[in-house]
C-alpha cells in the first residue's frame, strides 16, 4: 500500500463545524469523550523503525493486540470526509467527526459508537457519513426496521457492489505516551498491500505541533485514514509495497 504523498495535507479551512478547532484545546464530544488534534503520516519502513527506537527512550510504550477494522467510505467525488465511519473489529460501528483544522492538525471528535442491531440514531449518522441512500433509516410497509442495520454482515452485504466502498484494514499498533501526548506506530495491511502509519494525537494543539516538529514528522503529509484509503487503487497482485 502506497498512500499518496501530496504537497498539501488537506484543507486548511474547516471541513465541518469550525468552532471546536479554533481554540487549540480539545472540547468534550458526545458521551463526555474529548476530541483530539491529530496528524497521521505514512513513512517508510526504515523511518518507522528509527522512530520506534527514539520513542523507546523516555516514552511509555504499550503494544496493542492486532485488530481488523472495516472502513466504510463514501463514494468517490463526495468531497472531504468529515464523518469517518468504521466497524471496529468488524463488529461495532464507530463514527468520528472532523471538526476543523489548526494549522496542519486535524481536530476530530467522537461522534457515535453503537453495537448491532443499530439504533435509529446510529443508522441516521451512518447514512449522513456515507451520503448514500442505503435505506438504513427507512421502514417497511409493515413498520419494521430495514434489515440493513440488524448486523454487521447485513450492513456489509448491503454496501458491497454499491457506490460506497469497504476497506478492511489490519493493524498491529504500538502506542507511546508522555505528558498528555500520544504517538501511534502501526503496521498496516489492506488486501494485497502493506505499509506503516504514524499518528500523533493530543488534546492540546500547541503540544501536538511541538511533538511533530521534534520528531520531524511535520515534513510528511497529514492524511487521515479516510483520505489515504480513498486514494488507493485496487492492487493488480499482492505485494509488499512499502512507501
Image (spheres, rainbow, N blue to C red):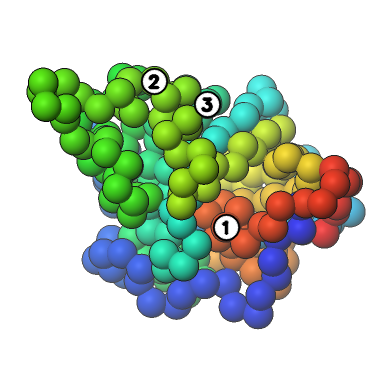
User: Residue at image x 62%, y 62%?
Assistant: 231
Q: Nearer the viewer, residue 182 or 107?
A: 107
Within 10 Å of the Cα at label 3, are there few (<14), some (14-19), or many (20+) other Cα atoms?
A: some
Look at the numbered disc 3 and give the secondary structure of its residue.
loop
The residue wearing badge 2 is 151
Q: CA distance from mark 1 to mark 2?
A: 25 Å
Q: Is residue 9 left or right of residue 51?
A: left
User: Residue at image x 68%, y 26%?
Assistant: 66
Within 10 Å of the Cα at label 1, are there few (<14), some (14-19), or many (20+) other Cα atoms?
A: some
Q: Quadrant of residue 140?
A: top left
Residue closest to the far front: 141
Among numbered discs 3 and 2, the one appearing first in the sequence: 3
Within 10 Å of the Cα at label 2, are there few (<14), some (14-19), or many (20+) other Cα atoms?
A: some
Q: CA distance from mark 3 to mark 1?
A: 19 Å
Look at the numbered disc 2 and give the secondary structure of its residue.
loop
Q: Position of residue 183 (x, y in %)?
A: 63, 47
Q: Are marks 1 and 2 in contact (CB under 8 Å)?
A: no
The residue wearing badge 3 is 90
Q: Position of residue 4 (x, y in %)?
A: 69, 66
Residue 40, above or below 155: below
Which quadrant of the rendered structure holds the C terminus?
Answer: bottom right
Residue 230, label in figure: 1
Q: Position of residue 110 (x, y in %)?
A: 35, 43
Q: Is residue 186 left or right of residue 13?
A: right
Q: Quadrant of residue 204?
A: bottom left
The reply to whether residue 164 is visible in this rendering is yes
Amino acid at each position: 500500500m502506497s498512500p499518496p504523498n501530496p504537497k498539501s495535507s488537506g484543507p486548511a479551512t474547516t471541513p465541518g463545524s469550525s468552532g471546536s478547532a479554533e481554540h487549540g484545546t480539545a472540547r468534550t464530544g458526545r458521551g463526555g469523550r474529548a476530541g483530539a488534534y491529530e496528524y497521521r503520516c505514512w513513512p517508510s519502513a526504515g523511518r518507522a523503525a528509527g522512530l520506534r527506537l527514539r520513542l523507546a527512550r523516555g516514552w511509555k510504550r504499550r503494544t496493542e493486540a492486532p485488530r481488523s477494522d472495516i472502513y466504510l467510505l463514501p463514494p468517490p467525488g463526495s468531497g472531504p470526509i468529515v464523518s469517518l465511519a468504521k466497524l471496529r473489529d468488524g463488529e461495532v460501528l464507530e463514527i468520528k467527526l472532523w471538526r476543523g483544522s489548526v494549522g496542519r492538525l486535524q481536530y476530530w471528535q467522537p461522534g457515535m459508537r453503537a453495537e448491532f442491531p443499530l439504533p435509529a440514531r446510529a443508522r441516521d449518522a451512518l447514512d449522513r457519513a456515507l451520503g448514500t441512500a442505503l435505506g438504513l433509516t427507512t421502514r417497511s410497509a409493515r413498520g419494521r426496521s430495514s434489515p440493513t442495520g440488524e448486523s454487521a454482515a447485513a450492513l456489509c452485504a448491503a454496501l458491497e457492489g454499491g457506490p460506497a466502498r469497504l476497506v478492511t484494514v489490519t493493524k498491529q499498533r504500538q502506542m507511546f505516551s508522555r505528558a498528555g501526548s500520544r504517538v501511534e506506530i502501526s503496521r498496516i495491511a489492506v488486501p494485497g498491500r502493506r505499509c506503516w502509519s504514524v499518528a500523533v494525537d493530543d488534546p492540546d494543539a500547541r503540544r501536538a505541533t511541538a511533538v511533530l516538529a521534534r520528531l520531524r514528522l511535520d515534513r510528511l503529509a497529514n492524511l487521515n485514514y479516510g483520505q489515504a484509503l480513498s486514494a488507493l487503487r485496487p492492487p493488480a497482485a499482492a505485494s509488499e509495497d512499502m512507501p
